[in-house]
Amino acid sequence: MTIRPCPTPNPNSIKFEVDGAPLIEDGLLAHHSLREASEHPLSVELFSLRGVESLLIVPDFVTVTKHPAADWDLLSEGVERVLEGYLEDGTSSARSTDG
C-alpha cells in the first residue's frame, strides 16, 4: 500500500493518492462537515483531525481541504496515519457510498 500526497491548485487542499486498496467501492463522497460525514467511518476519522474543513473521497484518492490557519506539516501526517489505519483494517473494500 502506498499513500502519495499531491499538491492541487488550491493551497488549502492536498490530494492523497492511495495504491493497493480502494477507499470506497465506487462513486464519490463529498463532506463539508462532521455531521455530513457521520455515516462513513473514514470521513469521521479524518474530520477528527484538527483543521480539516472538507473531504472528497473516491476509490483511489481523498482530497482534504484544510482551514486556512491549519498547518499542512502537522495535518498531512495525521491524514496519512488515518488512511494507513483504515486500509490496514482490511475493511475498506467493503465500504460503499450508500449512506
Image (tube, rainbow, N blue to C red):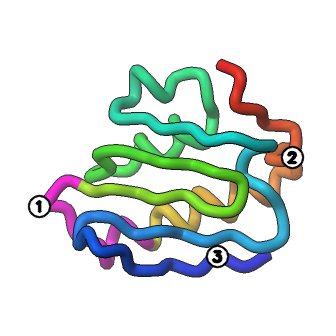
CA–CA distance between discs 3 and 2?
16 Å
Counting every numbered tag in the picture gives: 3
The amino acid type found where label 1 is placed reads Ala
Q: Any magenta on residue 71?
A: yes
- Dot 2 corresponds to which residue? 93
**Is 80 on the left-hand or right-hand side of 60?**
left
Q: Any magenta on residue 54?
A: no
Q: Residues within 10 Å of mark 1 (few under 14, many from 20)?
A: few
Q: Position of residue 40 (x, y in %)?
A: 62, 30
Q: Earlier in the sequence, mark 3 or mark 1?
A: 3
51 w.r.t. 77: above or below: above
Nearest the viewer among 4 and 82 is 4
18 w.r.t. 85: above or below: below
- Dot 1 corresponds to which residue? 69
Over which residues does the magenta segment extend? Answer: 67-76
CB under 8 Å between callouts 3 and 2?
no
Q: Which residue does the image show at 40% across and 21% down from the upper left?
A: 35
Nearest the viewer among 84 and 97 is 97
Nearest the viewer among 14 and 87 is 14
